[in-house]
Image (cartoon, rainbow, N blue to C red):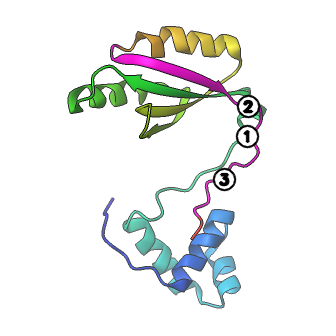
Amino acid sequence: METTQLVLDEKDMNILRLLQQDAKMTMRDIAAQLNMSTTPVYERIRKMEQAGIIKQYAAIVDPGKIGKGLTVLVYITLKEHNKKYGKKFIQEILNFPEITECLNISGEFDFMIKVQVRDMDEYRDFYVNKLGELDNLSHTQSIFVISVIKATHQVVY
């Protein structure tokens, strides 16, 4: 995927707003809502995809309704802080399907991961047999999500 710099105008931003609300909208529906024809809408979307502004289209799934009712935020500090060990840690956790997000953060911890599992037993198994087996962990702190108040993938601009 190309990562060219693309300057967005108000029409592009409006297209993005509509797609973030409903990525299944047809070109015709987007064009009608924005008082445009379909060809310019298609071209603008294609350019935003090529520039990497639109990264992907996805269905947003409720984890609890598919048997993944426990969400845990895990803060992680590494023992060694260099490029080699950081890269190794990242490569290892990319292989864990229980991890749905990983953020490199500042402050007391180095990373925050979001883990989605069925229940406490599944989390314990993940924590002991996967996360706990990584070589370079210094400290972890698990935070158990009681309820989700707000969750969105929409970027506000």
Q: What residue range appears in magenta?
A: 135-155
Counting residues from the start of the chain, the first of labels 1 and 3 encountered is 1
**Residue pictured at 51% horizontal, 86% vertical:** 40
- Residue kind at label 1, given as amino acid type: Asp
- Residue kind at label 2, given as amino acid type: Ile
Q: Given contact means CB atoms under 8 Å apart, are the residues at marks 1 and 3 in contact?
A: no
Q: Residues within 10 Å of mark 1 (few under 14, many from 20)?
A: few
Residue furthest toward the front? 108
Q: Residues within 10 Å of mark 2 (few under 14, many from 20)?
A: few
| Residue 8, image x, y percentages | 45, 79
Q: Would you name the residue on which mark 3 appears?
A: 152
Q: Is residue 125 above or below residue 152?
A: above
Camera-nearest label, 1 or 3? 3
- Would you say residue 155 is visible in this rendering? yes
The reply to whether the magenta stretch includes residue 91 is: no
Camera-nearest label, 2 or 3? 3
Residue 66's disc number = 2
Mark 2–mark 3 distance (CA, rounded to whole Å): 18 Å
- Would you say residue 23 is visible in this rendering? no
**Residue pictured at 46% horizontal, 57% vertical:** 55
Q: Nearer the viewer, residue 73 or 63?
A: 73
Which quarter of the image is occupied by the C terminus?
bottom right
Q: Residues within 10 Å of mark 3 (few under 14, many from 20)?
A: few
- Element class at badge 2: helix
Q: Would you name the residue on which mark 1 appears?
A: 62
- Element class at badge 3: loop
Residue 50's disc number = none
| Residue 150, image x, y percentages | 73, 49
| Residue 22, image x, y percentages | 68, 64
Mark 1–mark 3 distance (CA, rounded to whole Å): 12 Å
Left or right: 33, with 4 as reference point: right
Q: Given contact means CB atoms under 8 Å apart, are the residues at marks 2 and 1 in contact?
A: yes
